[in-house]
Amino acid sequence: MSNIIVVIGAGSIGQAIARRVSAGKHVLLADLRQENAEAAAVVLSNAGFEVSTRTVNVSSRASVHTLVEAATALGNVKGIIHAAGVSPSQASPEMILAVDLYGTALVLEEFGNIIANGGAGVVVASQSGHRLGALTAEQNAALATTPADALLSLPFLQPDQVKDSLHAYQLSKRGNSLRVMAESVRWGKRGARINTISPGIIITPLAKDELTGPRGEGYRRMIELSPVGRAGTPDEVGTVGALLMGADGAFITGSDFLIDGGVTASYWYGELAPK
């Protein structure tokens, strides 16, 4: 049987990680839009990878479960790269919580049921999760362990509490890292590992939209005032993904890796600190 790497979200970061970890394996590329999956499949196929495509809506349990069935029909699922999501400029608070928070919980739950022994996964979160103030211990535990289908009913996630898209995004991304920590315990019982990567501003088509959009000035300021003084590349995230999914990362699970050029450091302790 083939060894399968499932990539959910066929954008630049998902592809960059896949390129580093999928040699000799079958890549199953899934995206909400079939045309995105097919475009990415052409690129990866031309680079020598064996690829097939599916559509998936991560905010639907039935859709995620169908993807799990497609993956297990192909072979042993050895890797999961979850890079699907919507950004604050793209969506309402409700949609962000449904896709980025609930969707990630669904993916972790469904794939955690079938991940192969020796398998590993990465969830792409965001530096945004690190710019949210401290939550209570109860809120942390709720985000980490509430059954996926009850997550969106949590009192502190209701519309009267989460009024703007950025707040929804920050909560979702904080929730992703907490969820991965909790799920790593369950994945470990199957002999598998799972971690989060929290990228900063990485130059992708989405980031270019953000840089020229209504929040563009803030993004450019983040880059200029960060210790590294530039944006990142998908390949740099791919390097971290390769560490976390490969043999060199065998002792790493339930962890979150912030890769943001120091933007978060500057936000809390430097020139980006809120006045």
Image (cartoon, rainbow, N blue to C red):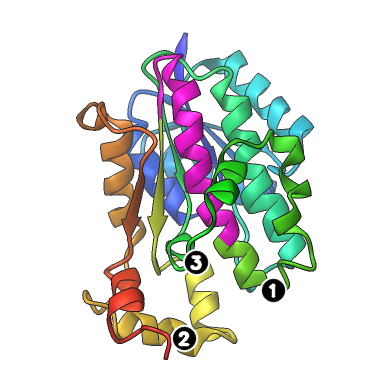
Give the amino acid type for the residue marked by disc 2 in the picture.
Gly
- Residue 83 visible in the current orientation: no
C-alpha separation, residue under disc 2 versus residue under disc 1: 17 Å
Local secondary structure at mark 2: helix
Residue stretch rendered in magenta on the structure = 171-193
Give the amino acid type for the residue marked by disc 3 in the picture.
Leu
Mark closer to the chain start, 2 or 1: 1
Mark 3 vs mark 2: in front: 3
Query: Which residue is nearer to you in this view: 9 or 23?
Result: 9
252 displayed left or right of 169 = left
108 displayed left or right of 224 = right
Query: Which residue is nearer to you in this view: 244 or 159?
Result: 159
Q: Position of residue 177 (x, y in %)?
A: 47, 47
Residue 184 within the magenta-colored segment of the rendering: yes
In the image, residue 153 sits, relative to residue 161, either above or below, namely: above
Residue ID at (60%, 35%): 145
Q: Which residue is mark 2?
A: 218
Q: Which residue is mark 1?
A: 164
84 displayed left or right of 130 = right
